[in-house]
Amino acid sequence: MTGAGPLVLVVEDELPVRRFLRAALAGHGYRVVEAGTVADAEHLAPSHNPDVYLLDLGLPDGDGIDLTRRLREWSRAPIIVLSARGREEDKVNALDAGADDYLTKPFGVNELLARLRVALRHAQASPEQPPVFEAGPLRIDLARREVTVNGAEVRLTPTEYRVLALLARHAGKVLTHRQILREVWGPNATEAHYVRVQVAELRKKIEADAARPRLLVTEPGVGYRLRDRLD
Amino acid sequence: MTPPTDRPSPEAFLARVTAEEAKAQRARFKVFFGFAPGVGKTYRMLQVARDLVAEGVDVVIGAVETHGRYDTAGLALGLEVLPRRALPYRGRVLEEFDLDAALARRPKILLLDELAHGNAPGSRHAKRWQDVVELLSAGIEVYTTLNVQHVESLNDVVAQITHVQVRETIPDSVLERADEIELVDVAPEELLQRLREGKVYLPEQAALAREHFFKRGNLLALRELALRRMAERVDEDVLAFREAHGVDRAWATAERVLVCVGPAPDSARIVRAGRRMAAGLRAPWFAVAVEVTSQPPLAEDDRDRLEAHLRLAESLGADVVRLSGLRVADAVLEFARRKNVTRIVLGKPRHPRWRDLVRGSLVDEIIRGSGDIEVHVLSGSAEEPPPRAAPARPGERAPARAYARATAIIAATTGLAQAARALFHVPDVEMLFLLGVMVAALTTGDRRASVLAAALAVVCYDFFFVPPAYTLGVSDARYLLTFAMMLGIGVVIGTLTLRLREQQRAAVARERRTSAVYALSRELAAAVDAPGVGAACVRAVAEAFDCEVALLLPKDRETLEPIAAAPPGLSLGAGEQAVAQWVLEHGRPAGRGTDTLPAEPIFCLPLRTFGDVLAVLALRPPGERRLTGEQRDVLESLGRHAAVALDRVRLAEEARRAALRAKAEELRSALLSSVSHDLRTPLAAITGAGTLLLDEGVAEPALRRELATTVVEEAERLERLVSNLLDMTRLESGVVEPKREWVPLVEVVGAAMNRLDRALVGRPVAIAIPDDLPLLSIDPILIQQLLVNLLENATKYTPPGSEISVRAAREGGTLVVDVADRGPGIPPGEEERVFERFHRAARTGVGGVGLGLSIARAIAQAHGGRLTAANRPEGGAVFRLTLPIATPPQASKEPAAEPPSAREVGT
């Protein structure tokens, strides 16, 4: 807890997990404030005004999704929710309520740090989008609406392009089916399979092997994520 | 992280169990029994209560009338008194015992004076003894007082002695329910002395009866009656004791009494007499009513009276039986033989002798046919019954139209007869008039109208045709005979027609009900669940009775929930709910037409087979209508059918649950034996590696790293194991419904591949999915899990570096996905066993619990698909997933409009 690294508010009731998070974060230059309950979190958040929240969805005294909604009323700081496998609905609800990303328990330090990095980068980014997105062989020039893979231009339909551009603007972050639908098809669209079909088409054009996607990955039960770097 | 489970605290649980036990236990019921007002019953009851209070027993006064007698009132001092309930009634406020307050207060013993008291209108029950029955069944002991003249079976004897008819009576069964009866006795002289001193309270209306009632002779007789009743009771106690202690039975109980019940008013006396005889013989007894199928049904008031008599018999402990047959005597005797009845009781005929000559005598026929059965013919009432109003048969209120039609027909006949004589010189026009009378009788179907027609025919015939013509005079006396015949024929035909119509109407009604019962039983046989049974039952009842119906099922012992209603969505008012609730708790009918909560517009019938009430059937007849006894019979038989069906459905459901439980139990035991090892192994590795890391002695970075890797890998293995176990449990419990979405297969395969990235390092995976596959309606998470399990299985059982292939193809209406490997394959004959839980291939040392494939198969089945295993001809195993293909929705759609500038997603 030294220096002026980003301040993380960890909201988690399980002491062992908190201990691990504290060690991992402090070791990588983050400052940490801890809360064990929703009440604590609501008390600490306004006074510390953290740069990012790590929020467990299963808290003893309340609903993490409600907490997300209430935090979003006044804070734009990224919120990353922690949840177990099999609770995909919770994750989607949290993301739709304003959370930025999620981590499925159990997770490793690398995953945690990567999520935090992406979240903080998006939070700090200037409102003006970087005109060019690059990850592996994929290059998207948002200003010129141009997409190339290994230097060769890829022809996309307008819808495919809109989906891809949306994912690129949120590179590294997960977007739910509903978020993509709303942004691309308009607020009244509800048919998640529109998104799925477009993504499948996109993969054929930008992935080396559409059946084993490396760039545009599926988050099962939640949505899609365009990776911002290839490991 | 899991929320605390919502489990009742041990204290609450214990309290519930104790309450249930108390309820199950028979609450004691004590009656202070006397022969007249003023003998000191209330005084004695209060004395006993004071003693009990002194011993620390929780005694509360529910209702005690001290009538201002200071000595009695003094005894009540210091005892807890329940506040009375105020009931507004016709501008006055009546104070009444508060049953709900008593149930809520739950004292050990409740004092409730005057068992025969009639409750104020608006109370739950019409009579106080019903309150007592409810209190007792709630486990509260009750002490009460009673005078001998209020006992139902002694009612008419008392009336004979004292000439005072007592209206408020209690069924004998209530008195027999008493665990203890204490006789409060005083010499009649002393009672009269008390009366003179004004110590005996009499309500004003009874003051007139005082002269009659409090005569020494009366009091002596009443005292004898009370003492005799006590003696009978002592006898019974002795008998019960002897039986309980295995002493040989002192009396043969082979006697059975049958009482013939009819609509005649004195039948009630016969019923009471029959009950006394049965009680004296300690014999079971039947009250039998016979419906004669060849005769028109009884008039409304006769039927009501008959039902009242049968209810009386029931309340006196009789088995009420309704028979039907062509002749009363035959039906009674046949039943008597079948049930080994030893005595038949019936009333003396009250009709004139000549009717026996015409119709035959019931008494004669029964005596003749009785064989070795004793027949007791008892006298009816000593006084004449109130003069019966002329029977108001519905068909006899002839509408003006019937008269008009009869008149018109006779007028036409007269015209026709005139014409016939003028034109054809027909000599015997009286035949034409007879024809006219018959036509009038047949077309009006009314006796009075046909009598009118006959009379008119006589007049017209006389006036127009009988010489001297155009006068009413008759010159030849022979014509008088013709007149009489015409009149007679008119009356006979009219009567016959009317009877025919009534029989027809009754037959139609019977037919309608029989077919309702029949149709219901057929529909019920087809119903597989409670809502199905409910719908069938409600429909049948609504059709048969033409009223609003709902079937309510207890949701959690406490609350009732409608599962079917006609019209659908019928809702009950708060009062009606209370009726249904009461019926659920007490298992007896209530509501309109009964003595319990009669003010509510619905009638509720409990549906039960044995034991608990399964459901409550609620009927709301239109307007002020009440169900007749016959209708209640039909309803009860419909209800019995429904109850049996509900029971069947419930048992089937229970059997299914039991099977599920057994399966879960089996799973759990298999789990325990198989899993403990698999769970402990990674835990042992983690603990070992962790403690070593803590040990300062291990400083070598390479070793530390190795230990850390062990911790991580074993933890991951543990996680997989736990996930599998959770998945399996969820799938096994049947709670997993696939959340179907329209998904391209390639996406699901891709997600599975991504999840297995690390496990598949260095393995070629050939994926072949045709481009033109339709979207699938599947749960993407579950199918991904299925594929992950298949792929994991392949990586575990095949040599590293060997190829795995995933191929999809459309085959007709199904999609086939093959996951194939080049490993050793499945041992022959094990193709099915690999899907069994906890099955692991014997020869390999592969970790895992052996759940992956059974989970995969469960997922396939949840999707209506199949998962099978086989060996490939070229070597290796192949797992084939077959999924049905549904018609996919419109594949894609261009955005509706130019999207908003996508700067920020979400909020």
Image (cartoon, coloured by chain):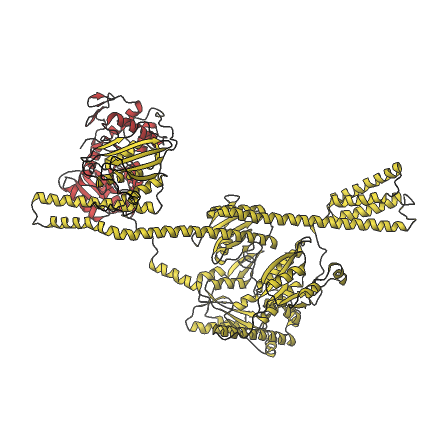
- Chain B: its colour in the image is yellow
Percent of width and height locating residue A201: 29, 26
Residue B302: quarter of image: bottom right
Percent of width and height locating residue A206: 24, 26
In this rendering, position of residue B201 left or right of residue B791:
right
In this rendering, position of residue B895 left or right of residue A217:
right
Q: Which chain is red?
A: A
Q: How many marks?
A: 0
Residue B744 visible in the snapshot: no
Percent of width and height locating residue A27: 14, 41
Percent of width and height locating residue B481: 86, 51
| Camera-nearest residue between B637 and B381 | B637
In this rendering, position of residue B613 left or right of residue A17:
right
Residue B904 visible in the snapshot: yes
| Camera-nearest residue between B623 and B788 | B788
In this rendering, position of residue B155 left or right of residue B795:
right
Residue A51: quarter of image: top left
Question: Considering only vertical position in the picture, is B46 above or below A73?
Answer: below
Quarter of the figure with the C terminus of chain B: top left
Residue B795: quarter of image: top left
